[in-house]
Amino acid sequence: MLLVLCVDLDDDLGRKTGLDTPVVGRQNVEDAAVALATADPEDSDVNVLFQGIRVHDELLEEEDEEVEVAAVTGLEGSDVKANRAIGEEIDTVLASLSTGEPIHAIVISDGAQDESVLPVIRSRVPIDGVRRVVVRQAQNLESMYYTMKQVLADPETRGTILVPLGILLLIYPFVTIASFFDVPGAVVLGLISALLGLYTLFRGLGLESAVDDAADRARNVLYAGRVTIITYVAAAALLVVGGVRGIELLQTVTDGISGDPAPGLVLAALVHGAVEWFAAAGITSSLGQVTDEYLHDRFKWRYLNAPFYVSAIAIVLYALSGFFIPDGIAGVQTFELPGLAVALTVGTLLGVLSTLTFAVAESRYPTAPEGDQPASVTHD
């Protein structure tokens, strides 16, 4: 009996079609080939299966003995495990063939890698021949053109290959143009090298997905018309102004004392000069967020705590930092112990009262939609 054995070492048939292997019988192998061709028309194992069917039909007409065709698969990854899996499937195929005749095999494969399993097959059944399937179009220029066209049409491959190649090809023109403006060529080469390094690092760390997600979120925010866009920009400007104001106040304090300021005094001056602007930034951004929540029907009374909390913290920090700054410095508001106690009390009361006020408002005037309210329970 002749057994036409189609070998798929990396189990493309099982992984891509979900079929159980081994596949035995002409009709079963043909159905499996059609399923694999439907799942992945470019898989070379499709040709192996159809070639096995063709060899089966030819031998059935030419030979007087029985002919059967089967497809066996291995495993993706390890060649050793794949060979063992194929050996187990061959044992299954041989056990399913009810014949009293000796069995000889003809192996069909698509390359040298699949043929590495030949010793495993030969240990179980004699091999009369090996046929390697080579797609005819893969040997001419047309196939090469088609392959290059497919590679260049893929956005990921195009970005990975063409961008670095384009930068490298631009080195000579950039150096030539730089020479007309008396710019050293080393500067141009260093700049291009830095661009290539950043691009390689960007691709190596896989940051393109994070950048794409950030761009999508920013575009969605712009299209949604959120108030937070304006308030965040204003808050950023206030933070910059606050940082500059803190540095200016530190310089004023430094000029108003003798010697170098202590680390605690430096921190106090920076906080004292910047905290008002930082508080304004926090209040601005929180009000924008509260407005967006209200416009999207997600408003809660407790969201209004944020501006009051920011104000309370700012009052405490402003008074505390002013307490550590020496008196007598022009343009600096300092605090004595009674003033610090008043500021701490006001900040604490402001936070507590806002929390209680909005908690009461939430309980008496709930803002949750009707669908979010718990269903009432009725008793018969």
Image (tube, grey):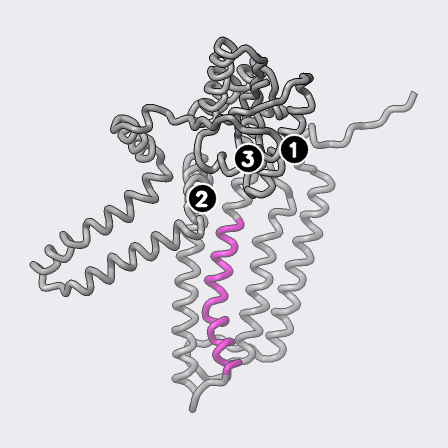
Outermost residue toward the top?
A: 61
Outermost residue toward the right?
A: 380
In the image, residue 158 lies at what x, y percent?
32, 39
In the image, residue 242 lies at what x, y percent?
43, 64
**Disc with the residue nearer the chain's start (2 vs 1):** 1
User: Which element type, helix, strand or loop, lies under badge 2?
Assistant: helix
Where are the magenta residues, as a range? 263-286
Quarter in which the C terminus is drawn: top right
Q: Amino acid at mark 1?
A: Glu
- Magenta region includes residue 343: no
**Comparing marks 3 and 2, which lies closer to the viewer?**
2
**Disc with the residue nearer the chain's start (1 vs 3):** 1
**In this rendering, would 367 be left or right of 56?**
right
Q: Name which residue lies at 63% across and 69% down.
A: 344
Q: Residues within 10 Å of mark 2 (few under 14, many from 20)?
A: few
Which residue position holds label 3?
296
Q: What secondary structure characterizes most of the magenta part?
A: helix
User: Which element type, helix, strand or loop, lies under badge 3?
Assistant: loop
Q: CA distance from mark 2 to mark 1?
A: 43 Å
**In this rendering, would 183 be left or right of 33?**
left
> Which label is found at residue 88?
1
Picture quadrant of residue 301:
top right
**Comparing marks 2 and 1, which lies closer to the viewer?**
1
In the image, residue 98 lies at what x, y percent?
69, 17
Q: Name which residue lies at 59% across and 55% down.
A: 308
Verify CB contact (< 8 Å) between mark 2 and mark 1: no
Which residue position holds label 2?
209
Q: Nearer the viewer, residue 255 or 335?
A: 255
Quarter in which the N terminus is drawn: top right
> Which label is found at residue 305?
none
